[in-house]
Structure formats: C-alpha cells, structure tokens
C-alpha cells in the first residue's frame, strides 16, 4: 500500500541492486510523520501503519485514529509485547467499549423488564420501584429516551390504579352513608353502575380483594334493605338531636340506672375508631365485652354492633396493609446482601427491621406463620456474615491475647539472656527491643478485662532490657562524638587526608552496625558527622580550583579546533591530520563537557571525511567510466579491423579525448590500442588471426570472472561454467598457490585483443558493476 514509507537504505528484497531512490533514515521518519498527519480518521491505514512502523511515537500518534473494537483488538494483539504505550491506549479504549456495551446490555434488560411489567395486568408499585432501582445504576445515555417512554407508561398505569382504588373507596364510603329512605334504590343503582364500570376498567385486577369484598357485602346489605318496603323510612340520624341529647336518650329505662362508665367507653371506642387508633380501640372493645349486670337498649346494642363492625373492617384493612408492609420488610431484608454494607451497619439494619416487624404486630395483629418464617429465615441469612464477622473478631481478640502472652514471655527470655551473658550482643538487644515494641503496637484489639494486666507485664519485662541498653548507648554516643572531633581535626591539604577520612567513616559504620542508637540521636549525630566530612571535602575542593581553570582553558582550545574544522568547506586530508595532532596534544577538559566536546569534534571530522570520501568516490566513478569508454573504443577499433573498415576515422583523436586511467589500466589498454592502430595501418590479417586465436581465451576469462563475481552466464554456457567451476575449486584448494584477484583477472581480460560479438560485449559490460568495485 505504502511500501516506500518503510523501505530503508540498503534494503534488497529481490536480489537486485539497492534502489538509489530509497530515502535515508531521517527522510524516512519525516515521510512517515507526514503520513500520520494526513490520516484524518483513516482507521485501516492507521492500523496498517502501526503494524509496520518502527517508530514508537509515530505508532502512538497513529493509534489516535483507531476507534472500532475489531481494529483495536488487532492493534492490541500486535503491540501487547512490543509497544507498552500503544497497548495501554488501545486497552483503555477496548475497556471503555466493553463497559459501554455492558451498560447498554443492562439498560436494554431493564427496558425489557419494564415492558414486561407494562404488559402484565398484575402491575404493582413494587415492580416499578424494582425497575427504577435497576435503571439508577445504568449508564446508557442512548437508551434514556426509550426508558423514559416506557417509564411514563408505567406511571400512567399506576396513576390509573390509584384513581381506580380511590373511586372504589369513595363509593364504599358513600354506601355506608346512605340512609334507608325512598331514594335508596336509585342511589344504589347509580353506585352499582359506577362500580360495574370500575370492574370493566383495564386496571381492575389491581383492586384489593378485601376492598371489593367489603363493597359487595355492603352493597348486598343495602339492596336487601331497599327490597323491604317497611325499612324505607326516614333515617333516624336525620332527625336525631345533638350528641349530648342522644346520650341522654340512651340512658337506661326508668327504674334501671344507666352505667355511665360503660357509655363513656363506647364514646371512647367511637373516638378511637375515628382517629384510626386500632390498638386503643381493641383494648376498649375487650373492656366492653364484659357486659354482665348491664342491660343495653336496642339503640345501644345497634350502636355497639356498628362500632364493632367498623373495628373489624379497620382491623381487616390493618391486617391486610400490615401483611403488605411485612412483604416489604422481607424484601428489604433479602436485599441487604446486595448492598455491601459494613458489618456493624448490617447488624443495625437487621435489628431495625426486626423492631419494625414487632411494631407491626402491635398495630396489625400477629403475622401469619408463613410470613414470619420467611422473615426470620431472611434475617438469619442476612445477619450470617455479621455473625461470622463478630465471631471472627472475638476469636481475633483471644488470639491477640495469646500473642501478647507470647511477647511477654519472649521479652522475659531476652532479659534473662542479658543477665546471664558475660558480654551482651547490643545490636541484638536493640533489635529485639524495637521488634518487641513494634509487635506489641501492632497486636490488635484485646478484651478490656485482660488489656491493662498485659500492658503492665509487658512494660515490666521490657524495662529489664531497656535499662542496660540505655546505659550502653550513652557510651556509644561519646564514641561517636570522638569520631566527629577526629574528622574536624583533619588537614584537608594533606594528600593522605582522604584515606584518613575513609578510615573514620568505616569506624563510624562499624559502630552503627554494632549498636544502633535511638532514631533521633542517630540522626542528629549523623548530621554533625556528615557536616564535618563535607567541610573536609570543601577545603579540598578549593585547592582543586586551579586545576579546574586549566581544564577550562583546554576546553577553549579544543572548541577553537572544532570551530576551525566546522568552517572547512572542502575535503582536505592535511587539515584532518593537523587537527588530530593538535587535539591529542591538548590536556583534559572538564568532565561535564568532555563527552559533548568529543562528539562535536568527531562530527566535524566526520563531515570533512565525508567530503573526502565523496571526492574519492567521484574520482573512482570517473575512472570506471573512462575505463569502460576506452575498452569500448578498443573493441570498436578491433571490430573495424575485422570488417576492413575504419580507415577514415581519427582514432587517435578519439583516444586522446578520453580521460587518463590509473597506471595499470592506462598502460594495458594503451598497448592494446597502439597494436590495433598499427594493424589498421599495416598487418590486418595477422591481427585478425590473433584476435580469432584469442577468442576462446576471452570467453574462458569472461566465464571465470562471472564465476568469481557471482554473475549469471546464461543457459548456453551452463555446461562450460560447471566444468570451469570445478577447475576453479580445485585450483583454490592447492596448497601454496595464491589465488588471482578479480582485478588482476579483469586487467588480463582488458589486455587480450579478441573478436567479440554483441553477446560477449554485453557479458563484459555486465561484469563492470561487480568486478569494477575491487579496483575503485
């Protein structure tokens, strides 16, 4: 596609000569950089470039144009073990694509679930809440519009369910407020038609069965009342007096005193029901059930029956709502495992949910056994990690107490060893003291009832080690102070001062290894010791200032040589020799600039040497061209002799017009040309006979040169070539025989006058690029 971008100088993939147009290394890099700049989103070209380019920064720039997953995977597989930066960039994009696809899949699954519930006639708010929780963790902006449309439809269904349930509740309340009068049948018909319309609504499966049952029972009761004509009288409530008068009318008949406490409880029951305080109403109902010795009137009995019916209805509703709340509690417990809570928070959550369950028992009554078993199992399962965690913490505290006992025993053993030994290993004691103290600090939690006792025992055991160790460290501090004073007394001008300083430093290290001091003291003494050593080096540095000045002078001299060489515009071997002699005679330069200066000098020398090589190469090319032209002129003259032509040609002028050759070739071809000129003037036949005689030898010499140079001779010379190859091999294996060089063989060929056809001349021309290299 763009092979020229990757073709380097000297590349030869076909066996042919190197392409003169192949770009150098710098140009190749520039071409590839230009190609990368022009990619402009060409992903296939960028991938092909990355797989073939050898420049890491260009590969990284090309990788910015690769974005599709398939192409990224191709680049990642190729660059994973080759180019870390490209592989990291591609891996990041692949991870982003995989994350986006994963989020998209999760979003589609969430939308599919929402559509499932949208089509389900048993849709509940819990289902929509589940969908909302699932969508909350999805990051798929491209699906937001689709989800919002489905979610809006779900919200509309929920709103329709709420409106439907509110309508049934309102009609149930209207039924309970109907009076058994003449308009009862018409009102019942109206409410019945509205209820039938609700039952035909699309969301009617969401209506609670308890609510429908209550409405049906109340409606049937009122229909039965409406069917009995004698019951259709004006409602007593319409003409009843205010409540105080009703209480007065409810008193016991004459001769039977009323129980005011009982009536007060009935009033309290009615008030509790009005306020929805079911637990208070239940307690009052229990108290009212004991009616021994109390004779109720028909009105009181009817009122108490209505209140108890209302209590039952509210209790049923409370039980139903309580079971719904219990279902929610069970679901909340089951979801605790997915929330990745801390163990303490998990324990609080489980305890809080159990307390909520107990609170429901007081409000909604006892839960069904099945629900309780499900809740208890869910709580036990959810609390299991916390229970295991707290058990593990308890075991850790016991383990830490055992470790503390072991550390106390080890500290006591070290103290006993220090008391028994004649000469203590202070380094070991210091290390043991530090190790024991650090181990105690990292013990972890221990039960409080053991913590104080163990801390006291450990401090007492460690004190028996630290007391003698502290005394020995005071001795060591005095020794370090003496070493600091010894360094301060050194004479920086003495040539042995560095040796003395190294000796003091070695003694310091020996003392530090023998007994490490406390970190604060160690650091303070080391800072003072290092400052004293630095002072010695500073004084020695001052004495070396003169030497630095001399090196800078040498640098100036070498920079002048470099500048002189950089100003040379032609190749001159004498300039290089003089510069090399002068460069070697100059002394050392500052080390910081030595490498840079040497690089500048060698670069200038290389530039002049390149110019010299160019001059030599041009001269060599001119010599080869002149050799080719003079050999062609000899062949042309010999062909004229053989055909009896060429008398009118100024051969001498043509020969003189050609440049002179090197001595060997100029002399050899000059002799051959002169002999041919003489034969042209007189003696053609003899010269023609000589050329015919030399023709087999010429062919043999050409074939031999083709074998040595590795040039193809053609199919017609295959047999002769094979035979000659054997002879050449045998002659090369003979001991004591020096092989003839290609240049010598080619010089011999130039010296041999012989008849040559066009095929032979072409074979000679073909030898020039291979054989001519040796004499250039």
Image: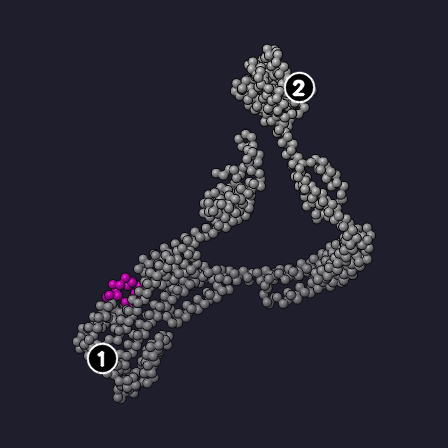
Does the magenta-highlighted stretch encompass residue 185?
A: no
329 to 25, vertically: above or below: below
Identify the residue at image location x=71%, y=59%.
Answer: 430
Majority secondary structure of the magenta segment?
helix
Residue 270 in sight here: yes
516 to 693, vertically: above or below: below
Does the magenta-highlighted stretch encompass residue 198?
A: yes
Q: Nearer the viewer, residue 95 or 549?
A: 549
Name the mark on residue 734. 2
Left of 426 or right of it: where is 6? left
So how many labels did they put on this image? Answer: 2
Per the model, the C-alpha gap separating discs 2 and 1 is 148 Å
Q: Position of residue 315 (x, y in %)?
A: 33, 72
Q: Report the magenta residues as a range.
A: 196-212
Query: Tag 2: Cα neighbours inside 10 Å, few (<14), some, or many (≥20)?
Result: few
Q: Nearer the viewer, residue 267 or 489?
A: 489
- Circles 2, 1 touching at the beta carbon (< 8 Å): no
Image quadrant of residue 12? top right
Determine which residue is flagged by label 1: 235
Q: Position of residue 734 (x, y in %)?
A: 66, 19
Identify the residue at image location x=32%, y=63%.
Answer: 156
Identify the residue at image location x=60%, y=22%.
Answer: 654
Left of 124 or right of it: where is 609? right
Residue 409 in sight here: no
Image quadrant of residue 508? bottom right
Q: Nearer the viewer, residue 307 or 344?
A: 344
């Amino acid at each position: 596609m763009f092979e020229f971008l990757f073709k380097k100088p000297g590349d030869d993939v076909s066996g042919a000569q190197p392409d003169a147009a192949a770009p150098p290394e710098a140009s190749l890099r520039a071409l590839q950089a230009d190609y990368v700049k022009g990619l402009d989103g060409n992903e296939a070209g960028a991938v092909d470039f990355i797989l073939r380019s050898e420049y890491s920064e260009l590969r990284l720039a090309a990788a910015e144009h690769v974005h599709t997953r398939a192409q990224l995977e191709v680049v990642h597989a190729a660059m994973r073990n080759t180019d870390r930066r490209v592989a990291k960039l591609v891996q990041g994009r692949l991870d982003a694509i995989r994350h986006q696809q994963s989020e998209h899949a999760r979003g589609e699954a969430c939308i599919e679930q929402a559509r499932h519930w949208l089509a389900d006639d048993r849709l509940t708010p819990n289902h929509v809440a589940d969908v909302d929780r699932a969508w909350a963790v999805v990051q798929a902006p491209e699906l937001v519009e689709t989800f919002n449309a489905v979610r809006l439809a779900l919200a509309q269904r929920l709103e329709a369910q709420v409106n439907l349930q509110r309508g049934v509740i309102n009609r149930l309340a209207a039924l309970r407020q109907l009076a058994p009068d003449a308009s009862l049948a018409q009102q019942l018909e109206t409410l019945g038609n509205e209820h039938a319309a609700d039952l035909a609504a699309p969301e009617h499966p969401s209506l609670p069965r308890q609510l429908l049952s209550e409405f049906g029972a109340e409606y049937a009761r009122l229909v039965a009342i409406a069917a009995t004509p004698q019951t259709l009288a004006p409602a007593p409530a319409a003409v009843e007096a205010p409540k105080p008068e009703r209480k007065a009318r409810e008193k016991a008949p004459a001769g039977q005193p009323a129980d005011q406490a009982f009536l007060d409880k009935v009033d309290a029951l009615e008030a509790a029901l009005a306020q929805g305080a079911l637990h208070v109403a239940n307690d009052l109902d229990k108290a009212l059930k004991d009616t021994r010795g109390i004779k109720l009137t028909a009105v009181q009995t009817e009122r108490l029956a209505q209140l108890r019916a209302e209590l039952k209805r509210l209790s049923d509703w409370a039980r139903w709502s309580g079971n719904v709340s219990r279902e929610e509690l069970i679901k909340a417990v089951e979801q605790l495992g997915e929330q990745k809570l801390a163990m303490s928070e998990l324990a609080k959550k489980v305890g809080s949910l159990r307390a909520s369950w107990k609170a429901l028992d007081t409000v909604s009554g006892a839960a069904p056994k099945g629900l309780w078993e499900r809740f208890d199992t869910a709580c036990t399962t959810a609390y299991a990690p916390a229970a295991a965690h707290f058990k593990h913490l308890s075991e850790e505290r016991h383990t830490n107490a055992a470790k503390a006992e072991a550390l106390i025993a080890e500290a006591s053993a070290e103290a006993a060893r220090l008391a028994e030994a004649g000469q203590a290993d202070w380094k070991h004691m210091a290390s043991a003291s530090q190790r024991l103290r650090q181990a105690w600090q990292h013990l972890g939690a221990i039960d409080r009832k053991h913590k104080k006792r163990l801390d006291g025992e450990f401090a007492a055991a460690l004190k028996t080690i630290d007391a003698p160790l502290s005394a020995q460290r005071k001795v060591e501090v005095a020794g370090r102070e003496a070493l600091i004073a010894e360094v301060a007394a050194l004479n920086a001008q003495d040539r042995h001062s560095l040796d003395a300083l190294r000796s003091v430093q070695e003694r310091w290290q020996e003392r530090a290894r023998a007994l490490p001091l406390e970190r604060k003291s160690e650091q303070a003494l080391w800072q003072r010791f290092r400052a004293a050593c630095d002072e010695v080096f500073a004084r020695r540095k001052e004495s070396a200032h003169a030497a630095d000045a001399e090196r800078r002078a040498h640098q100036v001299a070498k920079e002048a040589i470099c500048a002189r060489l950089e100003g040379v515009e032609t190749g001159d071997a004498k300039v290089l020799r003089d510069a090399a002699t002068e460069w070697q005679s100059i002394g050392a330069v500052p080390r910081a600039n030595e490498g840079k200066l040497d690089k500048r000098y060698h670069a200038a020398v290389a530039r002049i040497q390149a110019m010299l090589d160019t001059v030599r190469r041009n001269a060599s090319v001119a010599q080869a061209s002149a050799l080719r032209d003079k050999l062609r002129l000899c062949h042309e003259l010999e062909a004229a002799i053989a055909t009896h032509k060429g008398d009118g040609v100024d051969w001498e002028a043509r020969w003189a017009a050609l440049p002179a050759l090197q001595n060997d070739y100029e002399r050899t071809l000059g002799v051959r040309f002169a002999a041919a000129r003489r034969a042209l003037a007189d003696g053609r036949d003899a010269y023609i006979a000589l050329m015919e005689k030399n023709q087999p030898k010429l062919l043999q010499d050409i074939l031999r040169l083709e074998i040595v140079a590795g040039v193809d001779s053609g199919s017609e010379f295959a047999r002769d070539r094979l035979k000659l190859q054997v002879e050449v091999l045998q002659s090369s294996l003979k001991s004591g025989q020096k092989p003839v060089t290609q240049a010598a063989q080619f010089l011999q060929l130039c010296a041999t006058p012989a008849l040559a056809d066009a095929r032979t001349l072409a074979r000679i021309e073909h030898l020039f690029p291979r054989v001519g290299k040796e004499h250039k």
